[in-house]
Amino acid sequence: MMPGLTLLGVGQQRALLDRAKKEGVDVLIVFSVKITPPKKTNLTINEASIALLDVRTFKRLHATKTFRNTEVQRAREANKDDGLDKELEKLFAFVDSGLKLTALPSGLNSENVKNQVRRLLGEKYENPLPVLAEIKLYQSKGLYDKTVLHKAYNIVLKPTYGKMLASDNIEDRKRVLDKYLPES
């Protein structure tokens, strides 16, 4: 994904919370979707909401209301406010005011990063994407150059996939990421 974000996959909320805790995630974003097959009409009902959960305490930090696709569609057809934008604005306002990103440690320097990357490269990962994101973060902060990044990609992913991820070809990079992203 990107530094700071990890896609955990599809599953029940408790299982995702447990996995998030294991992966060292602080806040879990859960998209709850309930699909109801049509009974009388040909229209499938889709109910969806978003919740932010504190992984450490399992506490719900914020949640949107549940939206039903048919209600949203009716409001839009009548040129009325469906409420979706307002709910998303409230969600992002909460994230902006209620969650704090921490700065990288002030003592972080090239030598520290070199040691951390060496440690990361010495292990095997079921899902290497969080590790690759961490390594990319260090490079994006100027703590080492792209040559080191490319070598790290080759070590973590093996040379074929490492070269693809390091390339400028977006399709190659997507192919590598698709290999590791959870199936929906």
Image (tube, helix red, strand yellow):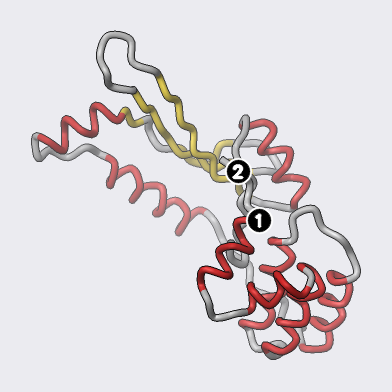
Toward which corner of the image does residue 129 lie, by quadrant?
A: bottom right
x then y, percent, for residue 183:
60, 43
For disc 2, the marked residue is 183
Amino acid type of the residue tagged 1 in the rendering: Lys
Q: Residues within 10 Å of mark 2 (few under 14, many from 20)?
A: few
> Residue 179 got which mark?
1
- Residue found at the far left of this picture: 78
Residue type at the position of mark 2: Glu
Q: Residue at 34% of width from left, 23% of height from top?
A: 45
Image position of 107 with respect to 104: above or below: below
**At which x and y percent is residue 36?**
40, 19
Quadrant of the rendering where the C terminus is positioned: top right
Out of 81 and 139, give the one closest to the viewer.
139
Q: Nearer the viewer, residue 87 or 126?
A: 126
From the top left corner, tell me how far across and down residue 140 is, in percent. Answer: 61, 82
Q: Are marks 2 and 1 in contact (CB under 8 Å)?
A: no
Q: Is residue 86 left or right of residue 180?
A: left
Quadrant where the image shows the N terminus: bottom right
Disc 1 secondary structure class: helix
Structural crowding at the residue carrying mark 1, measured as other residues with C-alpha within 10 Å and reported as few (<14), some (14–19) or many (≥20)? few
- 119 over 178 or under it: above or below: below
Q: How much space separates mark 2 and mark 1, taking CA atoms? A: 9 Å
- Horizontal side, residue 50 vs residue 121: left or right: left
